[in-house]
Structures are given as structure tokens and as C-alpha cells.
Amino acid sequence: MLYDEIRRNKRNSFLIILIFIGFIVFAVWIYTVAYGLARGEQISLLGIAGAISFLSALLGYYSSDKIALLATGSKEVPREGDYKELHRVVENLAITAGIEKPRVYIMNDAAPNAFATGRNPEHAAISVTTGLLEKLNRTELEGVIAHELSHIRNYDIRFGTIVVVFVGIIAMLGDMLRRMMWYGGGMRRNSDSEERRGNPIIFIIAIAFMILSPLIAKLIQLAMSRQREYLADASGVELTRYPEGLASALEKISNDPAPLKSAGTATAHLFISSPLGKKSSLGNMKEWFSTHPDPAKRIERLRAMMG
């Protein structure tokens, strides 16, 4: 059951990547046909958008851990002293996972939560709140740490960077289309100086696509984020061999009334459970716009693994 869950989540993540690539290819085709661009110009358009998005993502990729730790007020703690037991849990599970022990940080916050960051196991860090240490028992803490170590072992930060590149390309294509509309008026001239337009029907579709594509790209990105949480849950259980530890921890974290003061929309996706609250006016559509799956669904899946 456990390995079936891991295989299913990896397969679903790969499928969403393919959907993202297909979405970008379709976007390029729509935009270029709308303006009657030649094949070489189509390739140039995608190349420019991809290069700029990649450079932006590369900068974030190499500095994402420092930014996340600074933004959340995380402070590195020594091995000896009050956090000796936390270091021991992290070290034991890192050995089980077959990766280097990440650096250990603490957030001075009453809300129970945790996150991992770092582009690979050699540059990784785990940060937990003081509230997590106070409100969870040893077994639950192990479940949370195993989940975060799984994010590191599964290279989820690197995976997320690829998604950022995809989203950036789509945003760049939309911006290029807007500029072409404002400065080119939807018109261009060929080498014979004869004025010509792209297909007018495709042009209308391109306008609609320009408006909707950033939203669609964001929804795909959020879907991938939720899928990686399911994968980290399953991979974490592979380390502890005890699904109830993580399930019980998620119950306590999601039901705790204390707000996480050190979290914002830019870092919410990093945490093991969404720190942005439960209230929403979106009803059943709430999960579409969430960085995390519904905690009840995660807990249900975890407890199903016990069979």
C-alpha cells in the first residue's frame, strides 16, 4: 500500500509536468498564429521568454534557502543545549533516509509548524517552530521531520524551481502578447512590405488565452505543490514505518488555533501545513487555490496505509 502510494504520487507529478509543457507549447502556437509569425520567429519568441524566466528562477534557486530562513525569522540552533533532542531526531532520520543531516533552525512562534528548504541534500535546512516542539510528542515530531526530510530527499525545491520556470515562461509570453497589441496593433509587415494579419479567430482566442493563461498556470503550479505534499507524506512514512505519527501530528497542527506570525503568502507553500488559516469564501473551489491538500484527506490517506 505504501509503495503504491509513492508510485502513484510520482506518476501524477510527472503527468502534471507533461501537462505544463503541453500548455506552454499550446500558448506559443496560439500567440504566434494570431500574429502570423514565421517558424523562426516562433522559436525566438519562446527562446527569449524561456531565457529571461530561467535566469530569474536560477537566482531564486541558489538563494531560496537564505531568503526563506530570513523571511520566517528562523535561527540556527546548536546541537547541545535545549535542542539536543531535536538534533538527535533529525540526525537519526537523515541516516535512515541516506542523506546528510540538514542544518537545524527554530522559529520562535506558538503555532506548530515546520518547513524544509535547500536546493539539494548538501545545502538543506529544516526549521520548526517552538510551538511544534511544545505541542507534539516524540512520535509525532518524528513524523513531521520525516516528511520534511522527504522533501529534501525528493529534491522538491529543485522540482519547484522547474515549475517556476514554466510559470515564468507563460507570464512572459502573455506580457509579450500585450506589448505586441499595444505597439503593433496586431499588425506586422512581411519582407515585401505587404501588410498582413494573423488569423482573426485565432487572434480572439489568443486574447482570451492571454487573460486566462496566468490563472491556469498558477492552478497547475498549486496542483503540483499539493501533489508533492502527498508524496512527502508517503515518503515520510517510508522512513518512520508508522503512519499514525504523521497523521496525529497533522491533526494537531491543522486544528491548532494559534496563527503562524512568521509566515506569508510567499513562504506558505514551504510549510508542512498551510499557515494562512482555514476561512475561505471559495467553498468547494478552495482547494484549487491552496498550496496544500485538505488536511482531512492527507490524514485519511495516512491512516489507510496502516492497513
Image: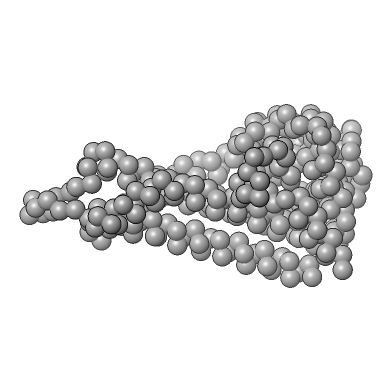
Question: In the image shown, does 283 or 47 lie closer to the viewer?
Answer: 283
Name the quadrant of the N terminus: bottom right
Identified at 78% across, 40% down, the residue is 113
Question: In the image shown, does 82 or 48 lie closer to the viewer?
Answer: 48
Can residue 118 be seen here? The reply is: no
Specify the quadrant of the image occupied by residue 263. top right
The total number of labels drawn is 0
User: Is 139 situated left or right of 15 in this image?
Assistant: right
Q: Position of residue 103 (x, y in %)?
A: 74, 41
Q: Position of residue 269 (x, y in %)?
A: 65, 43
User: Is 129 situated left or right of 284 in this image?
Assistant: right
User: Is 188 situated left or right of 205 in this image?
Assistant: left
Q: Position of residue 251 (x, y in %)?
A: 84, 47
Identified at 64% across, 40% down, the residue is 281
Identified at 74% across, 44% down, the residue is 273
Q: Position of residue 28 (x, y in %)?
A: 35, 56
Identified at 76% across, 31% down, the residue is 259
Name the quadrant of the C terminus: bottom right
The colour scheme used here is one colour
Specify the quadrant of the image occupied by residue 74. top right
Can residue 17 be seen here? The reply is: yes
